[in-house]
Amino acid sequence: MDLKNKVAIITGANGGIGSAIAKKLDENGCRLILTARDTADLKHLQKQLNNTVQIIEMDVSSNTSVENAFKQILEKNPTVDILINVAGVMPLTYLKNLHLEEWLNTIEVNVKGILRTLHGALPSMKSQKSGHIVNIASVDGKELYEGGAIYGASKAAIIALSKAMRMELSPEFNIKVTSIEPGTVNTDLREDITDKELLDDKDYGGDEPMLNPEDIARAVIFALSEPDHVNINEILIKPTGKS
């Protein structure tokens, strides 16, 4: 499918994966709407892009922020063709260490954030009877480990939600839904971790095999570029060297 002039919203566009996706979509001629809680980095990213770019402040953990953002988006764009949910947090913690606020915020951002953006984009996609929603999940939603209980649960929820969205939205409204499930990606997401015991136990340095944000961006382009009758349901991506 030709992506030229398609209107694409990216949440968390100021991060490594979000920025990489924005650049790939720009190469393919999309009209981009870049969103994040802090728009300073988005303005820097905008200078690197060639096509139409709209910058919108959006905190996916806030109903009001998301509602206001979509009002601004729909004032300038009669349709929304693509929604890419990248915004997320990863404050890994051991359950025994009782980081309740971090646990709740993980669900607030990673799961409820997608529900909020779905609520904002769905009316347009229903009206035009087309659209593509890409949810960035994680291999951690399928392969749990000590310290990753809440983060893994949030990503498992995204994978399940994506499947349910396909069941309900694809037959009636021709809306495609793809779940991208990366392994370890070379981003700053681990900087969210505050659990000192976990940080002492885990070795996040050395020669750990990692993906680059651009690897995830290529997967997104692949899913979006398939013909209308093809829906890439899930893409699980791991670094070479990890089983």
Image (spheres, rainbow, N blue to C red):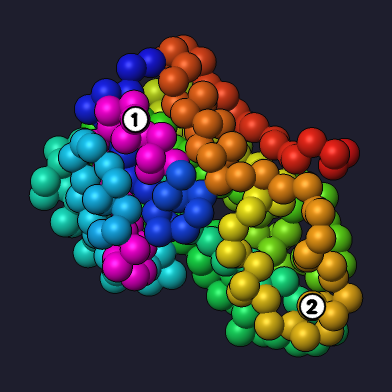
CA separation, marks 1 and 2? 38 Å
- Residue furthest to the front in view is 206
Task: Identify the image quadrant of residue 178.
Answer: top right
Which segment is the magenta one? 21-42
x and y, in percent, of residue 241 in the image: 85, 39
Task: Identify the image quadrant of residue 97.
Answer: bottom right
x and y, in percent, of residue 141 in the image: 72, 51
At label 1, the amino acid type is: Glu
Q: Residue 7: which numbered mark, if any?
A: none
In the rendered image of this protein, does residue 65 appear above or below residue 6?
below
Q: Indicate the secondary structure of the residue bearing disc 2.
A: helix
Quadrant (top left/top right/bottom left/bottom right) for the N terminus: top left
x and y, in percent, of residue 50 in the image: 23, 37
* Residue name at image x 58 percent, y 64 percent: 188
The residue that label 2 is drawn on is 199
x and y, in percent, of residue 236 in the image: 70, 35
The residue that label 1 is drawn on is 27
Mark closer to the chain start, 1 or 2: 1
